[in-house]
Amino acid sequence: MFRNQYDNDASTWSPQGRIFQVEYASEAVKQGSAVVGLRSKDHVVLVAVKRSPNELASYQKKIVRIDDHMGIAMAGLTSDARVLSNYLRTEAMRSKMVYGRPLPVGRAVNMIGDRAQINTLEYGRRPYGVGLLVIGYDDAGPHLLEFNPSGIVSEYYAYSIGARSQSARTNLERNFEQFQDLSLQELVTQGLRALRDTLQQGKQLDTMNTSIGFVGKDTKFTMLDGEATQQYLDLIDEGARHAGGRCDGD
Amino acid sequence: MDAIKIQLPHTVQPRAENANDGAVSRTMQPIVTGTSVVAFKYKDGIMMAADTLASYGSLARFRSEKRLMAVGDNTLVGVSGDLSDFQYMQHVLEDLETRELCMDDDQTLGTKSVYKYISNIMYNRRTKVDPLWNSYVVAGLDHDEKFLGFVDLYGTRYQSPTIATGFGAHLAQPILRKRVEGREDEIEEEEALAILDDCMRVLFYRDARSFNKLRRAKVTAQGVEISEPYSLETNWDFAESIVGYGG
């Protein structure tokens, strides 16, 4: 009786000027576990919480290397992210083969942005159900960009997407002005603090569920999982006590 | 039944209509050609020179052709060999420059990228057994680093502090070896110009396809600068003493 007539496909407008299918796809991004990205003048970092569907299953991979200078973190349908990361890897290789240079980060993200936008234009398609944070380092320095199902691509100093990511953004908004001069280690720590704010009551960041990725000046894209994340997890509370980013009351 | 019409790729054209027995013809030799290009590194960047002659066989057919070209702000390309193939390459490189400009994202195409791109085109065409009949010298400053590279019609490429193509490889290269190599970072512009002129003078004396009207160019931190045509001082007094050759 009151069924929505305007959400059958991604190329139909509602009279209010909305494309419902794209909005639904954006909801899928909000269901995925959170990822945080942040940038200094020399480095850019991704941190993510991994989820496992049950006790017996492994944790779902959240961060993917694209090339020595670029990586992505995903929130939403990971299988859609795999299609996009495959495409990015192919384009990164093509850039090296044809021009002998690493693919500029902004161009890479705009390429997948264009692909996502075509899904909102053509009959018989659906939007990607995934949001990405893309980090990379090129001639213009470190970059952090967001890709989302609508095809909008934006660049950020610091950003977060996924479940309860608003909490992380609030943290980042409070602190991002200091990020510019931070060392890589401090930047990762700040990222983990923002990421911690997205966790449900009673959940904690540990070596099983934390993923870290970074790239920067003279630093190839590096991914840390498992035990390798421990040294950074140890810094979360320590730094807060000394630097007083969040607990500056006492 | 109608005969099936086969669409041949544009690089593989059938011979004349009446002789189309499946044979194809390709560029078998260059037609209108440019001779040597000479280039070397010096203190402030790269110096390059080429004359302005386009020969039709041994005929000095066109005497005011430009064989040096700038690609973007920091790259200089010099060419010898077939000049119509060079004009094709000019279009390809202008297209590349336009594409890059349209990106409008403050990223610049470095000299190494232009070099890789040209190399790929050259190797791709040789693989189709339809080469572009040229030797290219690509010079520039890529991220403040001096770059000088060579590519030929086979897609063979090498980088060197001194490069001379064609006849220059025989006549100018030994001069460059002696006067430039090992001193690339010391040679001042004045000396570089003298070396360049000496090379071009020797080439004009001994290469019968050369011409005493030439351009020189340099790439420095200030960008690419290609000169107007000029001539060299020559002295032909020795010719009086030559006996024979129908004189």
Image (tube, coloured by chain):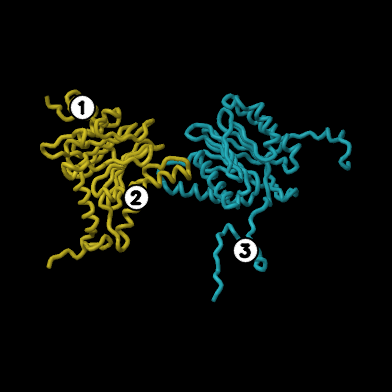
Chain colours: A yellow, B cyan
| Residue at mark 2 shares a chain with residue at mark 3 | no
Q: Are marks 2 and 3 in contact (CB under 8 Å)?
A: no
Q: Which residue is mark 3?
A: B22
| Residue at mark 1 shares a chain with residue at mark 3 | no
Quadrant containing the N terminus of chain A in the rendered view: bottom left
Q: Amino acid at mark 3?
A: Gly
Q: Is residue B120 above or below residue B12?
A: above
Mark 3 crowdedness (10 Å alpha carbons): few <14, some 14-19, many ≥20: few
Q: Chain of mark 3?
A: B
Quadrant containing the C terminus of chain A in the rendered view: top left
Query: Mark 3 falls on what kind of element?
Result: loop
Foreground pick, B131 / A132: B131
Q: Quadrant of residue A51?
A: top left
**What residue sits 27% from the left and 58% below the top?**
A126
Cα distance in 3D space between marks 2 and 1:
36 Å
Q: Which numbered disc, 2 or 1, marks the residue closer to the eye?
A: 1
The image shows residue A24 at horizontal and vertical percentages of 21, 55
**What residue sits 46% from the left and 46% below the top?**
B100
Residue A55: image tag: none
Cα distance in 3D space between marks 1 and 3:
74 Å
Q: Which residue is mark 2?
A: A112
Q: Quadrant of residue A215?
A: top left
Q: Chain of mark 2?
A: A
Q: Quadrant of residue B157?
A: top right
Q: Which residue is mark 1?
A: A234
Q: Are marks 2 and 1 in contact (CB under 8 Å)?
A: no
Number of labels in the image equals 3
The image shows residue A43 at horizontal and vertical percentages of 33, 33
